Image (cartoon, rainbow, N blue to C red):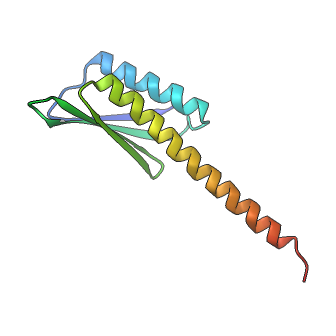
Amino acid sequence: MTKINFNAQNISWTDAMEVYAREAIEKGMSRAALEDMAYTVKLSIVDKKTKLIKVELSGAGFRAQCTNKDFYIAMTAVVSKFKSLVLRHAKKTLAKKRHIVAFDDVVV
């Protein structure tokens, strides 16, 4: 079960927004095998005239944010960015481990 904390500034969460955010995070992170982390979703209005909404997703030391007029588009983009960020880090870590193992096998 994924633990998700929701925070909002200058805007209120609706039930539909919370359900959409929860489903987007669980769906996106289950594909990346990252379901067991705790996530924080922060929502705030950047510009009241154009109604720009900033969505920030953080968890396990990673953070992604997106600003858009539509909450749903911003939420989808943030989950995609977050997933690619975590997967990129995992690939780098795996590559470093392979590199270290390759040098440990060499006998001088």
Report how many numbered discs are placed on residues in the image. Answer: 0
- Work out whether 65 lies above or below 52: below
| Residue, far left | 49
Q: Quadrant of residue 99?
A: bottom right
Is there any visible trace of residue 1 in the rendered image?
no
User: If the image is split into quadrants, where does the C terminus sit?
Assistant: bottom right
Q: Which residue appears at 88% of the width and 74% of the height?
A: 106
Can you give x and y, in whole percent of width and height, for residue 22 in the image? 42, 25
Q: Is residue 20 visible?
A: yes
Horizontal side of 79 relative to 106 (left or right) equals: left
**Which image quarter: residue 95?**
bottom right
Q: In this image, 67 relative to 4: left or right?
A: left
- Where in the figure is residue 76, as x and y percent of width and height? 41, 28
Task: Tell me residue 42's x, y (percent).
Answer: 29, 38
Q: Is residue 23 above or below residue 92?
A: above
Quarter of the image for residue 47 reads top left
Q: Residue at x 69, y 55 (%)?
A: 94
Q: Nearer the viewer, residue 9 or 90?
A: 90
Instruction: Please name the residue shown 13% across and 29% down the image.
Output: 50
Residue reaching furthest to the right? 107
| Of the pair 3 and 44, the residue shown nearer to us | 44
The x, y position of residue 78, in whole percent, is: 40, 35
Residue furthest to the bottom in view is 108
